[in-house]
Image (spheres, grey):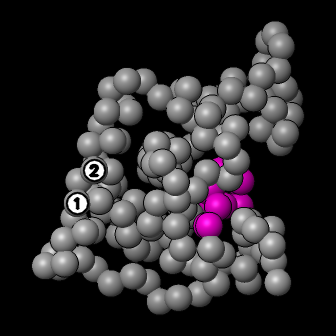
Amino acid sequence: IDLVVRHAARGAPGALRLDDAVRAALAELEPTARAIVQLTALAAGGVAQRTVAHALALDGGTLERHLCVLCAASWIRIASGALTGPIEPYHARIRAGVLASLRDDEAHALRHALAGALSRDRDPDHDAAPDPPPRTWLQLYPHQVSGPVR
C-alpha cells in the first residue's frame, strides 16, 4: 500500500496499480539495491545471503548495508529473523511486480549469476568468505520477521 500511495503522490497518471508502483519505486533504487531485490525475486524461495553476495560480487559490509535499507523499505525480509537468514521478497505481490519489471536480458544475467553462486556455495573445497558474525534482525526490525514473533 505504501508503494501505491507514494506512486499516487508523485502524480502517476491513470489507475493505480501495484505493479506500476513497484516498477517506479524499483527504478529509483541504487543499482546494487535493485539487483538484490531482483535476484531475490528470481529465486524460487529464500536465498542465502552468502549466495546473493557471491552472485552480485558484494562484500559482506556492502550487502549488509543494502539489506538494512531494503528491509526498512519493505522490499525484502530476512526469513528467519537472524542476520544471516535467507532473504526473500517482503510480499508475493512485490515479487510479482519485480518479476514483471525485469527485461529478458536482465533476468537471464541474474539467473546466470545466481546459478554460478549456487554452484560455488555448494562446492566444499571453495575458499568462501565466512558468514558475518550473528546478530538478530529481530532486535533491529521486529516488524520485518516472517512468522510469529515470540
Asked whether residue 25 is in view, the answer is no
| Residue 52: % across, % down | 40, 60
Q: Nearer the viewer, residue 5 or 55?
A: 55
Disc 1 from disc 2: Cα separation: 6 Å
Name the quarter where the N terminus is drawn: top right
Viewed as shown, does residue 144 lie left or right of 50? right
Q: Residue at x 75, y 29 (%)?
A: 18
Is 76 part of what is drawn in magenta? yes
The quadrant the C terminus occupies is: bottom right
Task: Judge left or right: residue 13 versus residue 112.
Answer: right
Identify whether 107 is placed above or below 113.
above
Q: Are marks 1 and 2 in contact (CB under 8 Å)?
A: yes
| Kind of residue indicated by mark 1 | Ser
- Is label 1 in a helix, a strand or a loop? helix
Give the number of callouts: 2
Q: Residue at x 46, y 48 (%)?
A: 43
User: From what the image shows, is residue 106 above or below residue 78?
Assistant: above
Residue 39 picture location, percent across and down: 44, 47
Residue 7 percent location from the top left of the image: 78, 29
Q: Check residue 119 in the rendering and tell me which mark sits there, or answer none.
A: 1
Does 109 appear above or below 118? above
Disc 2 crowd rating (10 Å Cα; few below 14, some 14-19, many 20+) is: some
Amino acid marked by disc 2: Ala
Give, as a single range, the part of the protein colored magenta. 69-79
What is the number of the mark on residue 115? 2
